[in-house]
Amino acid sequence: MKRSISAVLFISLIIITSANASQQMAIWDFGPIAASYTTNPTAEDLIGTPTLVLSGGTLDPDGKDGIAYTDAAGILHAAGQSAAWDEIKVSGDNARWIVTIDTVGWTDIGLRFDYKAWSSKTTSFDIDYRLNDTDAWTNILNNTPITGGSSGFLSFSYSLASLDAIENQPVVELRFNDFDNHGSGKLAFDNFELTGTQIPEPATIALFGFSITAIIRRRRK
């Protein structure tokens, strides 16, 4: 009986642990070539219908050369196109992108992307969030340092695990803006990925409990 119970407990632990591992929620790689440049998510089995909207600055309608990346799901994204602005600061309308995603059933949200800032004066940006399109934006990171004047792509990642407000929400908007630039500067970014930890459903946990109870009862008989 002990061996049977231990086996069930072990299998249950593996399944629950797997459910709690960080998983991909969405990724954008902007297409393999300029002719198919897109801001639609490119991976399968995405959570809900996440969107990414580019605006402001002098947005390049075809993007620029991107960088290869192997995502959290193990999928290789070839170096195709990246999103890009030919000038990130123009009068009254600075470069920004906004991501909207459903986080119901998810916790420990994380984000990452690759970026390339041609101007050495491009030094920082902000990240804000809100839970619907009528709320005021709440700042997450202010004047986040980035490296400008780069000849190649660099990566940026950040854990939002401590931000409980964006977990288990039907709508979460993340805004990346206020790119500090003291002159004309180009900016590109690629392979924007959101990850999270899926919360096990109560029914799944209960099923494991019932299975163990049933084994114990059968053994006692």
Image: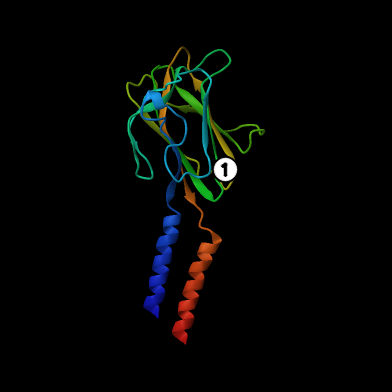
**Tag 1 residue:** 166
Mark 1: amino acid: Ile
Compared across the picture, whether 136 is left or right of 69 comes to right
Total tally of numbered discs in the picture: 1
Residue nearest the observer in this picture, 72 or 31: 31
The N terminus is located in which quarter? Answer: bottom left
Q: Is residue 100 above or below residue 221?
A: above
Up-down relation of residue 192 to residue 93 (above or below)? below
Whether residue 80 appears in this view of the structure is yes
| Depth order, front residue of 20/70 | 70
Q: Position of residue 150 (x, y in %)?
A: 35, 21
Q: Is residue 70 left or right of residue 39?
A: left
Query: Where does residue 147 sit, x and y in percent of width and height?
Result: 39, 24
Rendered residue at 51%/17% (across/down): 57
State which quadrant residue 192 falls in: top left
Say which element carries label 1: helix
> Residue 24 sits in which quadrant?
top left
Outermost residue toward the bottom in this view:
221
Image coordinates of residue 37 in percent, x first then y, are 42, 26
Could you tell whether 155 is left or right of 57 in the image? left
Residue at point 46% right, 79% down? 216
> Neighbour class for label 1 at 10 Å: few (<14), some, many (≥20)?
many
Residue 193 seen in render: no
